[in-house]
Image (spheres, grey):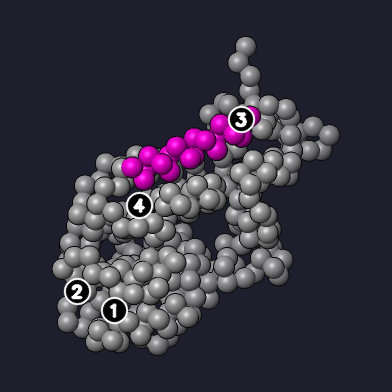
């Protein structure tokens, strides 16, 4: 873990729980794509950079989940590097309490104010103002989080953040976190059409052909939608729906999973309501959800 892997002339990644992209611009100038999950990850990244004699110029955060920006603070304080992301992600990078607050739907109790859901704050800037290395591009990958992006290096290598997950993950955990289901389907369609030398998702192995994994992710999303339609054949309030989802997919609830899976299930239900496949209504002071039956 935390080995530096070269995949093209100037493009590398650090093999870690959430893969970290490294683009070597010149002899003493490198850019990172994400920074790992905490200060320990930051230390390991710095050790790798020092061993190569590289100077860290900037970090691009694909999004503001703690496992992608958790190393920012240490690296920024030690190496005085810039941090860039999109404006909505910058807001969370600088104010990490926003993530558990949004997931929980209120002020998060202490057990939700943890490093898994909250990185240490760092100072970030809008990536639109960044002077990117020549030939480097970023592109939007909405769906997973507020305004997630991917990065293409001049070596024709795509870093895809959390827009797709490895088959081992989707078969074990089933429900990956998504904020906007419509946007996620659109992102899968977009990624499926990309042409490049190599594709590196944060939570899957690097691959030359991304299409099979895109299809597997799409199939799992459709499976979840079908299960929710089955679960909601009778009017049901949300907590019972969530309980049944955990049972159907043999998941184990803890505090983090409650807010992550709970938020994701709400997003799926919103998608189904907007598609006219589920109705929601208030009855006996409860918000209920029910699958629309065809007449």
Q: Quadrant of the C terminus?
A: top right
Label 3: which residue? 229
Reading the image, the residue beneath label 4 is: 140
Q: Residues within 10 Å of mark 1 (few under 14, many from 20)?
A: some
| Label whose residue precedes the other's in the sequence (2 or 1) | 2
- The nearer-to-camera label among 1 and 3 is 3
* SS at badge 4: strand
Which mark is in front, 4 or 3? Answer: 3
Residue plotted at (23% across, 58% down): 157
Along the viewing direction, whichever of 88 and 115 lies nearer the viewer: 115
Residue placed under numbered mark 2 in the picture: 25
Task: Looking at the image, tell me whether mark 4 or mark 3 is earlier in sequence order.
Answer: 4
Q: Secondary structure at mark 3?
A: helix
User: Residue 264: where, in percent of width, then height?
Assistant: 57, 47
- Image point 30% across, 74% down: which residue? 4
Quadrant where the N terminus lies?
A: bottom left
Left or right placement of residue 169 versus residue 135 in this view:
right
Residue 238, image quadrant: top right
């Amino acid at each position: 873990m935390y080995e530096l892997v070269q995949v093209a002339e100037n493009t590398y990644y650090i093999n870690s729980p959430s893969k970290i992209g490294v683009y070597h611009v010149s002899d003493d100038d490198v850019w990172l794509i994400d920074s790992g999950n905490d200060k320990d990850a930051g230390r390991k990244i710095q050790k790798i950079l020092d061993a190569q004699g590289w100077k860290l110029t900037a970090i691009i955060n694909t999004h503001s989940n703690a496992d992608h920006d958790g190393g920012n603070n240490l690296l920024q304080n030690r190496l005085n590097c810039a941090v860039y992301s999109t404006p909505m992600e910058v807001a969370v990078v600088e104010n990490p309490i926003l993530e558990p607050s949004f997931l929980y739907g209120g002020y998060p109790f202490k057990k939700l104010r943890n490093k898994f859901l909250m990185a240490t704050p760092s100072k970030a800037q809008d990536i639109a103002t960044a002077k990117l290395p020549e030939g480097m591009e970023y592109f939007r990958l909405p769906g997973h989080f507020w305004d997630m992006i991917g990065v293409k290096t001049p070596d024709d290598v795509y870093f895809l953040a959390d827009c797709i997950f490895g088959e081992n993950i989707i078969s074990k955990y089933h429900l990956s976190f998504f904020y906007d289901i419509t946007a996620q389907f659109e992102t899968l369609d977009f990624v499926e059409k990309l042409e490049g030398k190599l594709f590196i998702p944060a939570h899957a192995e690097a691959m030359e052909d991304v299409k099979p994994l895109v299809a597997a992710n799409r199939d799992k999303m459709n499976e979840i939608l079908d299960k929710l339609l089955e679960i909601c054949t009778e009017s049901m309030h949300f907590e019972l729906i969530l309980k049944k989802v955990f049972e159907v997919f043999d998941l184990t609830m803890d505090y983090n999973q409650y807010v992550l899976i709970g938020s994701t299930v709400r997003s799926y239900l919103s998608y189904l309501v907007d598609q006219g496949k589920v109705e929601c209504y208030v009855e006996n002071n409860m918000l209920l959800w029910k699958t629309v039956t065809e007449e």
